């Protein structure tokens, strides 16, 4: 057969060169994301933690680390299924498929320390000086909040983590409480801690104080307004903006022209802003009164109205949790039946999330100031998965491609500028799917208009959920 004079064979064959590590190390990769987590980095954390294999095995420690990271991208399959994804593009290398028992023992051999060390190397705001949306008045905007992750209902997890009570009796799964410090502009994880749910969010959050410093402002909801915690945050040199509980009655020390007033909370001098926020949609109007306290004391440099607008950035940490729990995990329970391996799995999940966020931020910077909010996290995950299956772009070429295949896909499919939308809070996994029909709960998302009025005079009490 021929086409425009060019002879064609009966079958067309497309060949490509795959560059990976040699021998049994070949399955140890993360597709194009390997450039962010290179072999040398993984080998370094294994050496540092003393987890390099004593003899060369079918599953070298480096391969196990990449397997654990890849598992964070393929939550729908077991570890053997993840192995199959890693070797799908490596046909002809004669690789032997391990057994499920072999993978279990390999995970136990590697342990949690290398994954924790890898996360410590990669965590951070993933932002440059000119990254859009990261800075506010020369401060890096961050937020702290917590969530819970479901883990398998095994005897080991139930004993080590406990099971919570609910209105229907004992909860279905043991849970781990995760509390993270997130950069709002990039949604990258600056630090994260986790532990039993019996310890509250504030108790866990005290361990995040180590990552706060001058040049930051941290946004907090009203669950974090304890005197001890706010004093600890202020002691780091970081600024804070926190929503106050309704039972607080801070003294009025001085009033300012912008409607705010100076007060003191837990020995920390703050400025309190009371405001009324109205959200208008086609479904109606809702108004609430809110009080915020901040260590930004200069009302001329930081007007009350601008500070209230900044507080809405706190929801970026909620979006980060949505991406971890819904996009990566697909709302699934974690895999590991024992708490020690749960910790390993969580550090691997946080690390792969951070790697994707770094890839998105690098793309935004290389493209000349694109806001990272316009890059689709789901698209980045899907592209990263495809490149793992193809074993593509594992090793960088001589000429470094700063954007890469993932970045080009993101730039070709940028989302529009964010619009203000609201949606009623609702349980995403109800015990009964019929409850919404009987209760008439509206779960639609609406375009909204936001009105902010600063309340001067006698301070009002907080009476609504977070705006």
Image (cartoon, grey):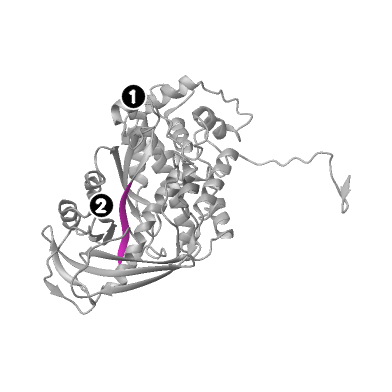
Say few, some or many: other residues with alpha carbon within 10 Å of mark 2 (under 14 / 14 to 19 / 20 or more). some
As drawn, 432 above or below 136: above
In magenta, the rendered stretch is 137-146
Element assignment for label 1: helix
Residue 399: % across, % down:
54, 53
In this view of the protein, can residue 154 be seen by the observer? Answer: yes
Residue 100 relative to residue 278: left or right: right
List the single residue furthest toward the front: 438
Main secondary structure type of the part rendered in magenta: strand
Nearer to the camera, 137 or 5:
137
Q: Residue at x 53, y 30 (%)?
A: 83
Circle 1 sits on which residue?
156
Q: Where is the C terminus found, in terms of image quarters?
A: bottom left
User: Residue 89, labelled with which disc?
Assistant: none
Residue 238 image-quadrant placement:
bottom left
Circle 2 sits on which residue?
223
Element assignment for label 2: helix
Residue 261: % across, % down:
18, 72
Q: Tell me the mark number nearer the camera, choosing from 1 and 2.
A: 2
Q: Where is the N terminus found, in terms of image quarters?
A: top right
């Amino acid at each position: 057969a021929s086409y425009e004079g060019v002879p064609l064979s009966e079958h067309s064959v497309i060949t490509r060169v795959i560059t990976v590590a040699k021998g049994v190390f070949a399955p140890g990769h993360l597709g194009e994301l390997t450039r962010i987590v290179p072999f040398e980095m993984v080998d370094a954390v294994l050496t540092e933690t003393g987890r390099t294999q004593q003899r060369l095995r079918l599953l070298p420690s480096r391969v196990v680390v990449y397997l654990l990271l890849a598992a964070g991208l393929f939550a729908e399959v077991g570890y053997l299924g993840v192995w199959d994804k890693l070797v799908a593009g490596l046909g002809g290398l004669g690789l032997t498929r391990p057994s499920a028992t072999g993978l279990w023992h390999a995970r136990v051999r590697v342990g949690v320390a290398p994954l924790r060390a890898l996360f410590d190397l990669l965590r951070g705001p993933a932002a440059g000086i000119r990254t859009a949306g990261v800075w506010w008045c020369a401060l890096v905007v961050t937020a702290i909040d917590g969530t819970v992750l479901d883990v398998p209902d095994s005897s080991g997890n139930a004993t080590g983590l406990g099971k919570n009570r609910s209105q229907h009796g004992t909860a279905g799964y043991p849970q781990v409480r995760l509390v993270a410090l997130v950069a709002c502009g990039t949604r990258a994880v600056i630090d994260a801690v986790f532990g039993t749910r019996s310890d509250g969010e504030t108790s866990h959050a005290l361990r995040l104080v180590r990552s706060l410093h001058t040049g930051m402002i941290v946004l907090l909801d009203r669950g974090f307004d304890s005197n001890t915690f706010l004093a600890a945050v202020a002691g780091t040199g970081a600024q804070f903006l926190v929503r106050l509980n309704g039972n607080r009655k801070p003294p009025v020390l001085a009033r300012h022209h912008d409607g705010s007033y100076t007060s003191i909370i837990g020995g920390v001098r703050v400025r309190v802003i009371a405001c009324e926020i109205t959200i208008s949609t086609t479904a109606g109007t809702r108004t609430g009164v809110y009080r915020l306290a901040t260590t930004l004391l200069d009302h001329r440099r930081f007007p009350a109205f601008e500070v209230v607008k900044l507080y809405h950035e706190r929801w970026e940490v909620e979006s980060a949790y949505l991406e971890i729990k819904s996009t990566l995990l697909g709302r699934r329970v974690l895999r590991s039946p024992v708490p020690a391996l749960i910790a390993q799995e969580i550090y691997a999940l946080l690390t792969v999330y951070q790697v994707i966020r770094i890839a998105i931020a690098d793309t935004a910077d290389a493209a000349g100031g694109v806001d990272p909010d316009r890059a689709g996290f789901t698209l980045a995950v899907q592209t990263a998965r495809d490149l793992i299956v193809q074993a593509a772009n594992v090793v960088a070429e001589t000429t470094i491609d700063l954007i890469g295949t993932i970045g080009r896909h993101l730039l070709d499919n940028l989302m529009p500028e964010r619009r203000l939308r609201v949606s009623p809070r609702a349980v995403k996994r109800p015990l009964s799917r019929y409850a919404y029909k009987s209760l008439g709960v509206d779960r639609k998302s609406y375009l909204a208009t936001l009105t902010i009025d600063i309340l001067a005079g006698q301070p009002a009490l907080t009476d609504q959920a977070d705006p």
